[in-house]
Image: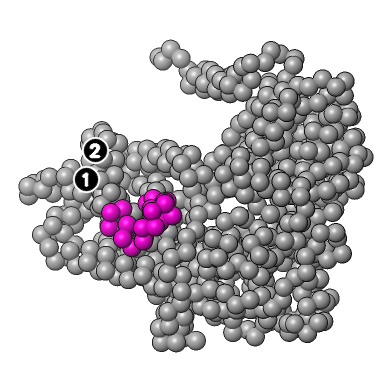
Amino acid sequence: MLTTTLILGLVLGGTYALLALGLTLQYGIARIMNLAYGELTLISAFVVVAFFQGMGLSPLLSLPAVAVAGYALGWTLYQIMMRPLVARSGGGGRLEVDSILATFGLLFLIQGGLLVLFGANFTSISYLDRGVSILGVSVALNRLIAFGICVVVGGGLALAMTRTRWGLTMRAVALTPGSAPLVGIDVNRVARQGFALGTALAATGGASIAMYQTFSATDGVIFTMKALIIVIMGGVGNVTGALIAGLALGLVETFVATAIDPGLTLAATFAIFLVVLLWRPQGLFGRG
Amino acid sequence: MIGISRRATLRALSAGMASALALSAGLAHAEGDTVKIGYAVARTGPSATGAGITTIPNYELWVDTVNKAGGLKMPDGSQKMIEVVEYDNRSANEDLVRSIERLASQDEVDLILPPWGTGANLAIAPLMARFGYPQIAVTAVTDKAPEFAERWPTSFWLLGGGHDYASGLVDVLSKARDEGKINNKVAVVSVADGFGIDLINGARPAFEAAGFDLVYDKTYPLGTSDFAAIMSEAQGSGADSFVAFSYPPGSFGMTKTAQSMNYNPKVFYISVGGAFPIYPGVAAGKAEGVMAIGGVDADSPAIQDYFARHTEFVGNPPDSWASAITYASLEMLQQAVERVGLDHAALAKELSDGTFETIVGEVKLENNQLRDLWWVGQWQGGAFRAVNPADRAGASEPVIPKPEW
């Protein structure tokens, strides 16, 4: 009973955390509150499904390609759409408001595009849909893979952020974008990298969603909301925080669903969210 | 300061868009020899999926079919081509209501087709009644249909209520239990949202009255994507029957989860989405024996012909629940117009009193409601066949226990 909850919860949490990693980078480093984040994950999910259905290409094989394409898309988006906003804001808080409005528009643009291209139907593929027994608990293989991707990507990213010089510059820009240029950091370049990397992660999350979940062109907002809760709980821009918050959310939801009532999972999610915000408004691992 | 105000720009833009829409639809026909039909459907937003599967394809198929045959027949024997005025209601009731007002007072369309969904149809019902347009609310499932039909006499309710579907299911299960095919225990989960609540509220008393024991009875929030915990509890409950009053994402998610954890209840019932043409694909080709809401008489030549035409025109087969009814409602409208013309009051009267030949058979409304419906269907041999009401012509025998995944 307890192992079941623990394993199912960890796997669910892993899929949540994977979804939130990109958003935390985009918001934390590039300071862009990307409301179209869920739509970006959906683009990749649809592309992966199209590859799978059209050419029989396994989602695991198309995943790296989609991630690279996501990086390129993020890079381009930043250059064309976000750069003028950043330049206009002059480093103040105006960027947040402007980016929210701009990406809100982008959300509808992408959603419309997806509806035209892929239609309104629910999309779902059967890929590695079999159960795998872990300590006697049957877990769907595709979710387990998503969890694995989360551990590898999230763990790698957390290490890179804390242990490498590249991570140091990233964190410098996240903490004090005003002072970073003083030590020779090109804030614009780093922010662009952060945004592009975030989009690549969104694409990775989308590819894994395509493997295990039914989705439709209008689902983006759901993913954005989930990711946003995790990002805020974990501390904006904090990769480790997002990982832990995601896992915690998965564990709590599963625990509440089995021990109390599945109807209370949403309530539990927002209850923890509220507690975290009251107790640590800057997030579990954020610096206030 | 700025020469053109935002309001003026907006007004000009929307007027321009409306005229562009109207122009593109009916350029070839002069005023008077076309029938203007308007609808405001969800092209974007959360309802776009439902509208895109059930409503829009059938409207387009019907208009195409009628126009290719020379147009709508009038009582005097003449034919008028259909000209469509369409708006996107963006899944928002405010936009929907505004569009209906516009269709009625500015575009002055002859007929208005309903939007997709129970909420949307309820939102426009007072307005449609005020403008006098008959409203054939085909994708609205509500137990209050009799009340609504009385309040708005020009409204028609074609898809039954939650209680109907729930009692249909209990009927099927009671029969199977009495034959000794399943035990007395049922595990039921329901989505905590309009339709799921309606169904579970109808099902609980019906199950109890039939002497079933609801050993697992839980609700889950809308938007739940992970069903591993719920399904493992249901599996451990000892029930032979698994019943989910769910929306498509949940129906699909539970199917996949049940397959991956090798949960093989003797009855596996899901609600909305089970009748979708993509369901067998979702179930990885193992949909055989899965029960869900709706169903069609798969042996009827009219239904087979409709499926073929829909597949050819839209690119995929229709869903086996509300799609055929939607198309049938348009056939009713077409025949009513042929008999009494475009006068709204006469049309409404003909719709409530007349008998119509449609793809779902001969239709006659009772108190402005369609009661001759299929409540439960089951995937059998690649088709989603209706199994309840069992005494209705065209019903198939349910297969219980369901074959293993």
Q: Position of residue B352 (x, y in %)?
A: 89, 40
* Front one among B2 and A192: A192
Q: Position of residue B211 (x, y in %)?
A: 81, 80
Identify the residue shown where x is 30% and y is 36%. A81
Say if A91 sits above or below B320 in the image.
above
Three-letter residue code for mark 2:
Gln
Q: Earlier in the sequence, mark 2 or mark 1?
A: 2
* Front one among B319 and A12: B319
* Front one among A198 and A279: A198
Q: Is residue B383 left or right of residue A212?
A: right
Magenta region, residue range: A44-66
* Residue A79 figure quarter: top left
Q: Is residue A58 magenta?
A: yes
Around disc 2, counting alpha carbons within 10 Å, would you say few (fewer than 14), some (14 to 19), or many (20 or more)? some
Q: Position of residue A14 (x, y in %)?
A: 37, 69
Which residue corresponds to mark 1?
Answer: A192
Three-letter residue code for mark 1:
Arg
Identify the residue shown where x is 78% and y is 81%. B177
Q: Is residue A159 magenta?
A: no
Q: Kindly identify which numbered label has been placed on residue A79.
A: 2
